[in-house]
Image (spheres, rainbow, N blue to C red):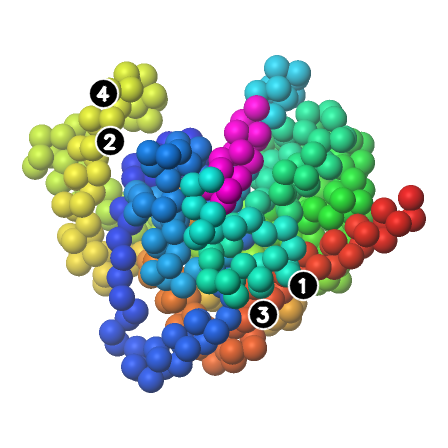
Amino acid sequence: MNILKTLPLFLFMLIWACAPDSSVDPELVAKAEKIHNSVITLDTHVDINTNNFTQEKNYTMNLDTQVDLPKMEAGGLDVAFLIVYTGQGELDQEGFDAAYENAVSKFDAIHRLSEELAPDQIELALTSDDVRRIHAAGKKVAMIGVENAYPLGMELDRVKEFYDRGARYMSLSHNGHSQLSDSNTGERDDVWLHNGLSDFGKEVVAEMNKWGIMIDLSHPSKKANMQTMELSKAPVIASHSSARALDPSVSRNLDDEELMMLKENGGVVQTVAFRSYVNSEKHEAYREAAAKIEEEVAEEMGFEMVSRDSIRQMSTETRGEYFALYQEMQKKAQPRIEQETADNAPSVDVSDFVDHIDYMVDLIGIEHVGISSDFDGGGGVNGWMDASETLNVTIELVKRGYTQEQIEMVWSGNLLRVLDEVQEIAAEIQAEG
């Protein structure tokens, strides 16, 4: 995830649904559909905006989001970890209080969806047994991940509070060093706050082990991740990370040393379908070509595109008008973008994404690899741009020879196995007093 979280999604991409690639063998598609409908598909990272959890506007509707219940149903996405995300702020009491308030509002929104707005369509799961029970009942499954433990402040008992609110994984930092851990962003300037984990961060690792919250490695620094895996008594996860070996420029991805240690730890890396993390060079070439076309279309419309700083300074009404015109421009530009970039600057796609799955399966074994989107936080690749296109990932896996058993492991089995082990170890720690 990056700064895209702070601005409306349609400023950066146009979501469109598409059928499976017509060039693929129909028998293969039929086989993939059968597998897809037989396994539990689980995405470990879907960002949310609390404005979409009201009586007037919520996930029962087809929203301008990449994930909602109609899209999950259309694409056969069964389980979504909805994310309690907090951007990194100042490490003082005022910052901690604001972060905590933000986190609670998102916890409450997720509970509101599953308990008040659509209890007949989606239910909150706290265990792997819950996931299977809810899925068998024909409902969609919500789970909760916390991205950035900054809202803990310096209060260790909030780990248990977040567990009680439904959190089943949590990362110790985001983009910026937290009070618990250095962030991967320290690679930009080689400035570090803790040289890995802080003393309080180490306490939080133990507390998460105690209560059964999976520790997420997707944003902390490499040194912090290595220290976390050394300290943790339970397997860890990377909720939305890909392979750094395939794109060395991306500090958010895990390098081979981290991946091998994750294997020894028994954890799982949830490969992320974020275009600039999958293939940053290819994505940049596509964006440059697309931006040129958008500029031409905007000029034809008489629409002036402005900087993000200018957008932030607009009144709410003016900003809304600007976004409406921007979205109109993107809709007009998209057919040209698809046609004119297809040969010279194609978009990062599902095949590129599954290349990362292949790489990590070969390196650390299929038992340690899963799938995530980072939808509504900047994620998406051509062919899997929203939840309605989820089948396309399974089609690509079948094309590459993955069996139903292997596909089930990657889509949900590995992550649920780690959740089970984390909760079993927590029960043992609690029993020891």
Q: Earlier in the sequence, mark 3 or mark 1?
A: 3
Residue indicated by mark 2: 323
How far is disc 3 from disc 1 in space, using C-alphas? 9 Å
Q: How many marks?
A: 4
Label 4: how many Cα within 10 Å (few below 14, some 14–19, many 20+): few
Question: x%, y% of residue 253?
Answer: 56, 51
Name the mark nearer the viewer: 2 or 1.
1
Name the mark nearer the viewer: 4 or 1.
1
Q: Amino acid at mark 1?
A: Arg
Q: Earlier in the sequence, mark 4 or mark 1?
A: 4
How far is disc 3 from disc 4 in space, using C-alphas? 48 Å
Question: x%, y% of residue 232?
Answer: 79, 49
Residue indicated by mark 3: 409
Residue at the spot 68% in from the left edge and 25% down from the top edge? 153
* Image: 33 above or below 43: below
Q: Quadrant of residue 99?
A: top right
Which residue is the extreme one toward the right? 432
Name the disc covering residue 298, or none: none
Helix, strand, or loop for circle 4? helix
Helix, strand, or loop for circle 3? helix
Q: Quadrant of residue 93?
A: top right
Q: Is residue 358 magenta?
A: no
* Image: 303 above or below 30: above
Residue indicated by mark 4: 318
Q: Earlier in the sequence, mark 2 or mark 3?
A: 2
Q: Amino acid at mark 3?
A: Met
* Image: 347 above or below 60: below
Residue indicated by mark 1: 417
